[in-house]
Amino acid sequence: MGDLSRLVLKRLGFGLLTILVVSVLIFFAVELLPGDIAQAVLGQGATEETVAAMREQLGLDRPAPVRYFEWLFGAIQGDFGVSLVSGERVSAAISGRFVNTLFLASYAAVIAVPISILLGVFTALYRNTIFDRVANVATLSTISSPEFFLGYILILFLAIRAAAFPAISSISGDMSLVDLLYRTFLPMLTLVLVVTAHMMRMTRAAIINLLASPYIEMARLKGTPPWKVIVKHALPNAWAPIINVVALNLAYLVTGVVLVEVVFVYPGIGQLLVDAVAKRDFPVVQACCLIFAATFILLNLSADVGAILTNPRLRHPK
Amino acid sequence: MSTFVVLYYTALIGASCLAAYYEKRSVFMLIFSLTLVSFVLGIIGGVGALRFVALSAGLLALAAGTAYAFREFLIQISKPNLAKELRTAPLTAAFGMFVIFTYAIAGIFAPWIAPHGEAEVIGQAFQPPDANMLLGADQLGRDMFSRIIYGARNSVGLALIATLLAFLMGTMAGLFAAVKGGWFDQVMGRVADVIMSVPSLIFALLMLSIFGTGLHVIVVVVAVIYSPRVFRLTRAVAGNIVVMDFIEAAKLRGEKDWYLIRREILPNATAPLIAEFGLEFCFVFLLIAGLSFLGLGIQPPTADWGSMVRENATLISFGDITPLIPAGAIALLTVAVNFVVDWMLFRTSGLKEQ
C-alpha cells in the first residue's frame, strides 16, 4: 500500500503545482495590461493625481512578485482583496454566490450521473441498433448546441408556453429546499441535457472498448448469462473509465454553468465573473478565475486518482 | 377525433404493416414503437403533441430526402475515385455536407442574398414579420433575416480564422516538437498542459477582460486556447511517424527538419488532422458564440448570431421563437460539421469493427 499512497501523493503534488502555475498565469496576465491596472480602470481622461492615488491605494508601487505572494496567501485564506468598482471585499461578494453555483452544479450532477451511466451502458449493449443510432444523433445534437440555445428552448416551452416552471431562477437563503429545487429546475435541466450527452457518449465508448476484450468473449463462450458477464466480468474493469468520465464531466459542468447562469439570471459566481469582465473589475475576475480553475483542476485530479485506485495496472508504470 | 388524428394513425399503422411485410425489422420496430408512444402522447398532450410529432417526422423525412439528393448530386459531379468514397457516406454525413454548403453560399454571397444591410434601421423595434421583413425586426428595427444571413459571414468567418490560426500554431509546434524532441518537446508539452488545465471559457474571459474585445484579440486568444489540443494530436501522430524507417533514411540523406516535416511527415498525417480540424472548428465556434452571447465577442452593429440571441432574448418571454433562429443556426452548423467528421473518422480509422 505504501507504493499506492506514494503514487497518489505524487499525483496530488502535481495537481497543486498546476494550480500554482495557473495562479501565476492569472496574476501576471493582468500585469500584461498596457500601462497598469490604475490607468486601465480610470481610462484616458484621468488626471495624473487620481492615477497616482489609485496606484497608492492598490499598492502598485511595490514589485509584482511581492504583490503576487501577498495575493496568493490572501487567496488561500479566502481574502481576494477589494473590488475596484463597488469597493466591497471580493470574498464577501463571492462566498454566497459560490454556494449557489455549487448547489446548481451538484443538483445537476446528482440527476445526470446515474441517468447517463445507465443510458451509456444500454447504448453500448445494444450498439448498432435503432436505439443506439437515435441516441447517437440525439446526443450529438445536444453537444453541438450552445448552452444558451437549450436554455432558451426550455424557457420557451416549459416556462412561457406551458408555464410549469419559472423562467428566472431568483433564489434567496430563506426558501425551503423544495422551493429551491423547483426554482432552479430549468437551469438544472439545461446542464443535465448537455452533461448527460457527453457522459453517455464517453461511457458508451469505454464499455464498448471493454466488451471487445478477449476475456469477455471467453466468458460468453463458456455460456455465462449476459447479465452475469456484465456484472461480474465487465463492471469491475469498467469502474475506472466510468469514474474518469464522471469526474471529467463534472469538470465540464464548471464551465457550462457560466452561460446557464447568465441565461436564467441565476445569482451564481459565473454571472459575477461575466459582470466583472464587462466592468474590468480585475480583483473579482482574478478571484473567480482562480476558483473556477482550481475546481476544474481538482476534479481532473480526482479523475486521475480514481483511475489509479480502481485500476491496479496503473500502479506499476512500465 | 379530428381527421388529422385519424390520418395520423392510419399512416403510422399502414407504414408499420408495410415494413413488416417487406421484413424491414428495425424500420418496423421504429414505426410501431412510435405508434405506441403516440397513444400516450395523444392522451397527455392532445392533438397538438401529435401535430408536433408529425411535423418533426416530416422535417426529418425532408432532411433525409435532401441529403440523399445532395449525395447523388455530389457523386455525379465528382471524379470516379472521389465518387466511390462518397457512395459510402451515410445520409447524416451527406446532410452535414449539404448544410455546410448552404452556409458557405449564405456567407459568401451575403450582400446579394440579404434584402437589407446588416446595420440598416428600416422599421420599428420588434416589428412583427411582413412581406418586407421576413422574420420581423430586431430590438433596433433592423431586418432580422438580413442579419442572420450576414451572421453566417461574420460568425462563421471569425470562427474559421481563429481555427486556422489555432491549427497553424498547434500543428507547427507539434511537428517541430516531434522532429526535434529534447527540451523543445518538453517545454511545449508543459505549456500545453498548463493552458489545457484552465477551462477554456474562463481563460477566454480572463484574457478578454485584460485585452479588451477587439476582433484580433478574440482570434488570437481563442487560437491560443485551442492550439494545445491540436498540438497534442499532432505530436502523437507525428511521434508515431518519426520512428519509421523512411524518416531515418531521409535523415541519413541529410534532409533538413523542414523537408522532413513537409515531405515525409505531413502527407502521412493529413487524415487525422483534417478530422481534427472539423472538431476544432466546432469547439471554437461554440466558444466564440458563447462569448458573443455574453456580450464579449463580436461587437455591434456587426451582425453575429451569439449576440443576436442575447439582444432579442426579451422576445422569448412573449412566446416568440425568432431569437432562437440564430441560436439554432449555430447548433445546426455544429451538428453538420460533427456528422461529416464522424464519417471521416469512421473512414480513416479502425472504428469499423465496433
Image (spheres, coloured by chain):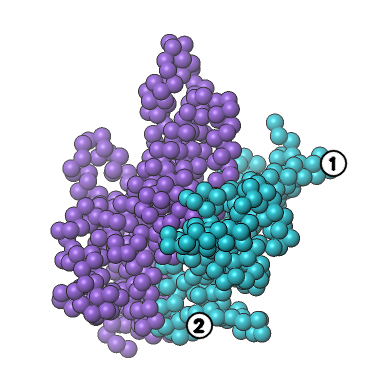
* In the image, residue A14 above or below residue A144: above
> In which quadrant of the rendered view does residue B344 lie?
top left
Q: Which mark is residue A2?
A: 1
Farthest-out residue, top: B253
Position of B83 with respect to A271 (left or right) is left
Instruction: Provide the secondary structure element on which disc 2 rests.
Output: loop
Position of B307 with respect to A292 (left or right) is left
Q: Which of B106 and B63 is in front in this view?
A: B106
Pinpoint residue A59: horizontal percent, then vertical percent.
Answer: 63, 56
In this structure image, what is the colour of chain B? purple
> In which quadrant of the rendered view does residue B269 lie?
top left
* In the image, residue A264 above or below residue B68: below
Pinpoint residue A296: horizontal percent, then vertical percent.
Answer: 61, 55
Pinpoint residue B241: horizontal percent, then vertical percent.
Answer: 48, 26
Q: Residue B91 carries which label?
A: none
Q: Which of marks 2 and 1 is nearer the N terminus?
A: 1
Farthest-out residue, bottom: B1
Residue position for label 2: A165
Instruction: Provide the secondary structure element on which disc 1 rests.
Output: helix
| Mark 2 residue type | Phe
Pinpoint residue A270: horizontal percent, then vertical percent.
Answer: 55, 66
Residue at the image point whose x is 79% and y is 41% from the top: A6
In this structure image, what is the colour of chain A? cyan
